[in-house]
Amino acid sequence: LDGHVVGRVITEVEVHHERAIRRHLAGASDFAGRLRGHTVHAAQRRGKYLWLVLDGEQALLGHLGMSGQLRVQPEGAPDETHLRVRLRFADHGPELRFVDQRTFGGLTVTELVDDVPEPIAHIARDPLDPLFDPAAVVSAIRRRRSAVKRALLDQSLVSGVGNIYADEALWRAGLHGGWPTDALPVAKGRALLAAAGEVMTEALAAGGTSFDALYVNINGQSGYFDRSLNVYGQAGRPCNRCGATILREPFMNRSSYSCPRCQPAHLMGLASLRRTGAAASTS
DNA sequence: CCGAAAACCTGAACGC
DNA sequence: TGCGTTCAGGTTTTCG
């Protein structure tokens, strides 16, 4: 986005689906009015949120949810089936389109407070942020009374890590996600955060993790990090490190994948998982 | 503070 | 072929 929309003036805004701007409480006409005539000064991100900096401490904030895309398309290119919002620019160059099949994502225009959009003040810095403070994050995780994977997915502790990269980071660090946060050795916590950063860096270099045409860059191209996954989606396959069979377990209404040998479960963690009704590996 | 469940959607894949 | 079920990368809210 930085290379395609920064410096350009927004002239036209079309909202094709109200749900895509549901977080903009003032509605579509207000949304359009706050964009029209304004210049895009920068493209920034934190964790899974991204925003375009506008004049007057305003920003166009977006989250892709599970199926959202921001696409740069020539004017006149056919509308995508799930086109939700279209921005046109004064130079009549390529449009910016928000496309989202499941409409879990969305856009809103909001105030910048200390250079961060006001609605995401609670979102922590992500592992690739230059000001990310691993020691402080490990302390915060250890203060929790929860399981390590839950903490890793909590965007107010560390952002940018979702279900796939959490499982991959846990595998790299040799940790089971059910490990109690207050029993996490500091060094293990540091290794986990370092692993998360490495997974994210490698995934970015590969263009992201794409299982289908929903996960694409602004030109619609898929990444290929899915070929580098060691545990996510690999149930039944041998661990790339020790050869044991990768397990799939239910977790928070979704799935966790891990190697039972490289990522041993903590006995107390297992006990508390059972107590709370979550599934636990008995191997 | 923590966890569970529901809510928000569409489409692909699968079983019968 | 068609119908119903299940599942998917996420966040937020509500409730206990």
Image: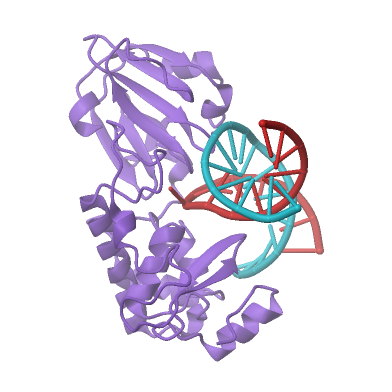
Chain colours: A purple, B cyan, C red
Residue A247 pos. (x, y %):
50, 74
Task: Name the residue located 44 percent from the left edge and 21 percent from the top edge.
Answer: A85
Residue A12 pos. (x, y %):
37, 10
Extreme-bottom residue of the structure: A267
Residue A248 pos. (x, y %):
53, 70
Q: As displayed, is residue A148 above or below residue A48?
A: below
Side (left or right) of A93 relative to A163: left
Q: Quadrant of the C terminus of chain A?
A: bottom right
Side (left or right) of A128 relative to A156: left
Q: As displayed, is residue A242 above or below residue C10?
A: below
Q: Quadrant of the N terminus of chain A?
A: top left
Query: Of residues A110 and A95, which is closer to you in this image?
Result: A95
Residue A113 pos. (x, y %):
38, 39
Q: As displayed, is residue A212 above or below residue A75?
A: below
Task: Name the residue located 26 percent from the left edge and 47 percent from the top edge.
Answer: A207
Residue A49 visible somewhere in the drawing? yes
Residue A24 visible somewhere in the drawing? no
Q: As displayed, is residue A261 above or below residue A9?
A: below
Side (left or right) of A33 relative to A249: left
Side (left or right) of A239 relative to A255: left
Task: Name the residue located 30 percent from the left edge and 76 percent from the top edge.
Answer: A191
Q: How many callouts does the rendering have?
A: 0
